[in-house]
Amino acid sequence: MKALLLENVHALARETLEKAGVEVTTLRGALDEDELIGALDGVELLGIRSKTQVTARVIDNAPSLLAIGAFCIGTNQIDLRHAAQAGVAAFNAPFSNTRSVVELALAEIIALTRRLTEKDKALHDGVWDKSATGAHEVRGRTLGIVGYGNIGTQLSNVAEALGMRVAFYDIADRPIHGNARRCNSLDELLGIADVVSLHVDGRPGNAGMFGEEQFARMKPRSMFINASRGMVVDDVALRAHIESGHIAGAALDVFPVEPKAQGDPFESVLRGLDNVILTPHVGASTQEAQEEIGWFVAGKLVGYVREGSTGLSVNLPNVQLAPRTSGARLAFLHHNIPGVLAQLNALLGEDGRNITAQSLATAGEYGYVLSDLEGPVGDDLVRAVLALDGAMTARIVG
């Protein structure tokens, strides 16, 4: 089995896959669509980060592909529905880099509120500017968190421990942590927050969600942080509000267009502004986070190809069975229509197969079942399963 890892995925991912008997090729940068199609010839496992786009065309031209690992949180760079239709499982790291992103956001909140970037630049320029003008403590100030998921809730907890008041807005019904205040609308949050920090996902509906109207509704001299997705924010509108003095400072770790490889030139309308921190998409770029992500996602890929496990898959029903000790395991992906499991078990019974363990889950339009069978299983049984009503993919795992 072969794997291709792109975008400088942590070495622990390669080590984890190789220990499982997978032949691994690694590349430091991202690949464009045509390059990726060429590189996936004969490859079963693909590992990417945020820049490589796995389109429907890529999936259609990679018949060997079994699974995709996004060594990050976001999966909007993958056509998840098309992958599912092709029987390609996708996995990400929803928790592994949470702390690293939170610490970056917190560092930026303090740096902006104390105007540390300006003090640093002045000293590097040989100017001694010892003044409290425009500098504040974060204690007692209000942090407004837009997107109260894994990162937003942990940022809420840490910020509150520093003495900040926390308000949040999320379209989902999230449980409240600590003394945080739920806002009923984004406008409500923008009107009370001294610092606004975005932590939303990359779904298409979030594109351009924060622009001229939202910046205008923020409190005068408030701060803005985006460590979520570049396409969420109108950077031109942000620049205008910084230049007017309405927004006192900003920190951005993500951008609508980002360089493809290390060392490529970076362009942004936000370059050159006072009290603006620009970082090259490093929210998850700590050694601890990358090591954890490398281990976690690679482990999910191994679990899928060796055991058929789809636990925490982002595009297939989640099914796990205990490791088998003998016999064979059949993995069967099908359309979620009535009677498929009955057909499968009838077929297995007619073939004289004793089922020692079985688990089925459905999600949306798909169903996925793992069946442990006594004795060896040949390709003839797989072909018979693929002939069932609603069949999508079937394979013997292990």
Image: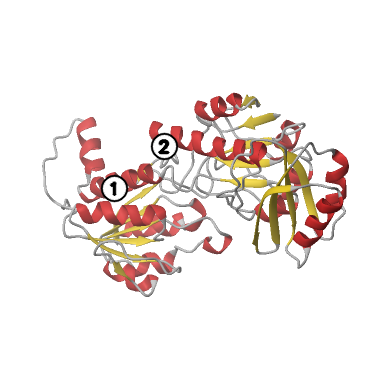
Residue 367 appears in the rendering = yes
| Residue situated in front as seen by the camera: 286 or 266 | 286
Q: Residue at x 37, y 75 (%)?
A: 184
Q: Is residue 222 left or right of residue 315?
A: left
Q: Amino acid at mark 2?
A: Ala
Quadrant that contains the C terminus: top right
Q: Is residue 359 left or right of residue 143?
A: right
Q: Residue at x 70, y 46 (%)?
A: 88
Residue assigned mark 1: 106
Residue assigned mark 2: 289
Name which of mark 1 and mark 2 comes first in the sequence: 1
> Residue 197: x, y in percent?
35, 56
Q: Secondary structure at mark 1?
A: helix
Q: Secondary structure at mark 2?
A: helix
State the CA–CA distance, disc 1 to disc 2. Answer: 16 Å
**Residue 62 in which image quadrant:** top right
| Residue situated in front as seen by the camera: 43 or 373 | 373
> Residue 141: x, y in percent?
20, 60
Q: Amino acid at mark 1?
A: Leu
Q: Which mark is residue 149?
A: none
Q: Nearer the viewer, mark 1 or mark 2?
A: 2
Residue 263 appears in the rendering = no
Q: Residue at x 42, y 58 (%)?
A: 149
| Residue situated in front as seen by the camera: 158 or 51 | 158
